[in-house]
Amino acid sequence: MSKSKIFEDMIQQSTDAIIYTNPDFTINFVNRTAEEMFGWTLPEIKGKTITIFHEQELTSQQKKEMFSNLYSGKPHDIEDASKRKDGSTFCCQIKISPLFTEKSRIYGYLGTIRDITEEKQNEDNLVKEIDLLTSLIGTARVIVAVLDRQGKIVYYNPHMEKLSGYKLKEVKGEDWISRFIPEKEKERTRSVFKKAIAGHPTEGNINPIVTRKGNEVTVEWYDTALKDDEGEVTGLLAIGNDITQRVEAEEKLKTIYENMPGGILMIGQDYIIKDVNYRTCEITGYKREELVGQLCDIVCPKGSASKKCPIWEEGQEGFRGMDTAIKCKNGIKKPILKNAQEITIKGDTYILELFQDISERKNAEENAIEAKKAAEEANQAKSEFLANMSHELRTPLNSVIGFSDILLEEVKGELNDPQKKYVSNIARSGNHLLSLINDILDISKIEAGQEQLEYSSFELHEALDEISILIIPLTSKKKIDLQMELPSEDIRVYADRKKFKQIMYNLLSNAAKFTPDKGTITIIANQEKDKLKVAVSDTGIGIPEADQATIFEPFQQVKSSKSSEHKGTGLGLSLVRELVEMHGGQVGLKSEVGKGSTFSFTIPDKPTSD
């Protein structure tokens, strides 16, 4: 018998009416007893408030007492008059219990209602009770049938008429099994009938009946022998519930259960595996019969030494979203993501363990880590190679530049105009190539960890004056106005002086490159708490917003029709960021196309621990 069936039976066969509401007291579910007790079917009242059953509204004091109990997690018991669909009332005992989520939030309420109307003691009242029961049999939403000792139809109620499509008068006196039972079930049903007629009641016997239209309706039967005053069996009373929809729902649940992408284990308090789904067998390599009935340590590496289930012993919290492993039949431990939840079925408590096989994800993560490691090692090797090639690259290039300068000075003789032009081109190209190599080598040395800072204390004004002299050849050619906005008092800088000057030179040369003739470049510096902030602002072409995110990356330049005429390595600003961050500072940028840019950086006023 499936767990969902047991649970359904517990609810539907309860002698108490059971009502489940949402947090706002709108009805979500009622059992058959509640339907019979109040006269409404679930579809008629689902979504309506529970006040539909109230004869009188609760007083404010009653409401206060009820919510005080519910919000503190206590059930609330009351005795009150309830109202049926037909307007009649009856006295009942009501117990309301709050339902909490794992995070202690109320997600609904469960109400159990019991009719406690006093039974009539006199004969007149007893007759009325009998009449009422007879009426209920006629209107009950269950099958009520009476058969004689031979199994012939004596009586069945209107609900059976509606369900089967046959009026009682059409089939009265016919053999029940011949008329209603499918061929494949006839023999088994006849055996059950003989057992019941012999005085052995049967409960929960399930077999279908065939309707007039040829459809099969699944019914759960409760059979009892009828006896006369002398105790002789006269026939059989059969009460049946139409469980067709429930069986279909169970089949769907079973299909979902067996075909879930993850494994499922149900473990009892004795650490014994009670049930598994098909996916569990696929993951572990065990057959179902090899797991059910075994200690759960057969698949649990953590519990194998103690022969105890760690979920029961240590609590469930540590096993929710847990990255762990499961033992397979072949001895391999597969990585899984596990969740454990306590469930109760017919009063017995179990642990429901759900897990996903994450072997592929783990393999992908390991491959990604290895790939990242290999890439980092390759990049480190590249950086070390370039850093170590500094001397080999610079020495011959310096010779080319040096001899070009000697020729231009005409120490060994005069040059004609074409010769001067050619030698000048060689010198200019050599210096450009040397600048490119120096930038590449500086970046590579930083990446290779070979660049070290040599901190010293120096005056800001003095360092900026030295840089201004170096930048004059670039600004004077385009008649750019170089301005400074500095504090009147001296500011001392704690940094690597050479690297600081390199940062400023790169920012100023970059500004000069992209500022048109007769433009302005402004150096702004001030002390902010425990750091120095320096900004270089220009009236140049500006940088589009789309390019601002990558402008500090190596070999990145602004791509526009105006910027294409400005040649460069694309390493100057990248080197600025690397050198500033080596000092423990940060770089910034504000720019607007056609109006200019402001590059800024901050460095601490004392050396960093790094």
Image (cartoon, helix red, strand yellow):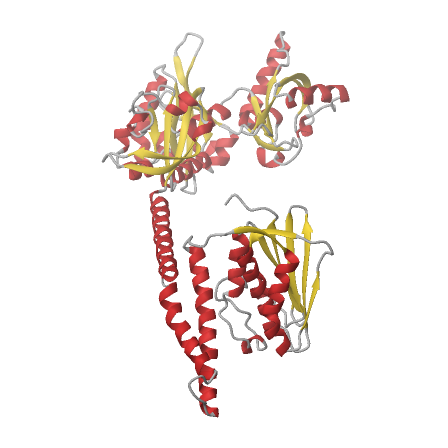
> At which x and y percent is residue 185?
32, 32
Quadrant of the frame with the N terminus? top left
Question: In terms of depth relative to the viewer, which is nearer, 504 or 135?
Answer: 504
Relative horizontal placement of residue 54, taking residue 506 as reference (left or right): right
Residue farthest to the right? 60
- Residue 321 location, quadrant: top left
- Please tell me which residue is depicted at 63% across the width and 62% down the height of the picture: 464
Residue farthest to the left? 330
Question: In terms of depth relative to the viewer, which is nearer, 186 or 34?
Answer: 34
Position above or below: 463 against 433: above
Question: In terms of depth relative to the viewer, which is nearer, 272 or 217?
Answer: 272
Position above or below: 485 against 73: below
- Residue 175 location, quadrant: top left
In this orientation, does residue 175 appear? no
Position above or below: 163 against 452: above
> At which x and y percent is residue 444?
42, 60
- Residue 4 location, quadrant: top left
